[in-house]
Image (cartoon, helix red, strand yellow):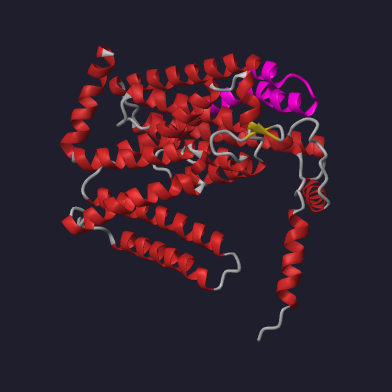
Amino acid sequence: MAHLKDALQPYLKETFEKKRPAPTLALVALALFAAVMGAADGGYFTRQWAPATLVLAALALIASLTGVLRGARSQWGNLALGLFATYAVWTFASLLWSPNQGDAWVGGGQSLLYLLMFWLAMGLMSLGASRRWVLAASAIGPAVIAALTLLSLTPPRIEELFENNRLEGTVGYYNGEAAFLLVPFWVAIYLAGSRSVNPILRGLILAGTTLGVNLAVLTQSRGAMVAMVLSLPVFFLISGQRLRGFFALVPVVLALLFTFPGLNEVYLAFENGESAPAALGAVLPAVGLSALGVGLYCALWGLLDRRWELTRGVTRVLGGLALACGIAVLVFGLAAASEQAGDPVSWADQRWEAFKNDEAAGQEQTRYLTASGSGRYTLWKVAWEDFVSRPLL
């Protein structure tokens, strides 16, 4: 513990010399508060979000009366806050015409909670809170919940945390659990590749996000998989450290390739009526070792960063090699997929027809290969036909 304190002390001193500690600590607490809500059914039920809303409303009222949060905000920030407030007012106004007053009230109350969180975060940022620390807290919070969830996956609790062969976790809904675990993923990748973050913290963040990704596989959420694929090019388009992001992403991907077969066996055990606890127990050591390996890799990388900085020329060469390797992997991957699945256009058309007809082909291998729409296409079609059939006046 003493060695950890000594390692973090220069970083803490540097951070708090440039930023104000009180707003930073308050914003970190706000980020961790979101993680705690994620551990409590995702904050979905009234017994979770209503007390939280009252507490944040009281803090916002005190801050307004004392003028604590009068720091200067950007015009874009004020615009975002105004739009958010307008949306919250609209959700409450829907009580006037909603056929389900209870659902409308719940939606309005939850929107108010999100608005309060956003407003307090903006106010604390305007007071000089450290972005780096709040980003780290937003990544570490869900990672801690992921680690605790993995430790709690003992035989008695597996039936409680799984539903329909898929992990519901602390959120109580498969897709919601996957979203909770994966939303901070790109924040973690960014921090893990940043030279300004302490090496030990970088290792902890990347190890934590590796645990989160592995746990998200157990949800068998196809929507999360699609979202991650679509967000990949977005991150590298807007990131200011593409090469570093790539070096942080690669070990997580390799760890996932190592653990995915075992994690998928848990889903198959449920499907085939076999022992899911045994399948889970067999893969948990691999999950822990992969996260530990990724964390050590990132910590060592951080220590090298402190002593050796790549020149611009070397960075360009490495970046070019990384880009070339990425393109090669993409080309060979598409070629291999074409040989197995045939013409991509025909394959996409087949998947679309399978989605419309709720076909579950591929489910015997993994849910990630299925195209079943679970009746969504029929519902959308009926809703659209009902909409277009209504008179304009």
| Residue 137 point in image, percent of width and height | 36, 35
Q: Is residue 337 left or right of residue 155?
A: right
Name the quadrant containing residue 340: top right
Quadrant location, the C terminus: bottom right
| Residue 83 point in image, percent of width and height | 40, 65
Foreground of the two, 21 or 109: 109
Q: Where are the magenta residues, as a range? A: 252-280
Q: Is residue 383 left or right of residue 49?
A: right
| Residue 9 point in image, percent of width and height | 21, 23
Residue in the image at 67% along x and 21% along y:
262
Q: Is residue 139 visible?
A: yes
* Magenta segment includes 50: no
* Magenta segment includes 264: yes
Quadrant location, the N terminus: top left
Magenta segment, prevailing SS (helix, strand or loop): helix
Q: How many marks?
A: 0
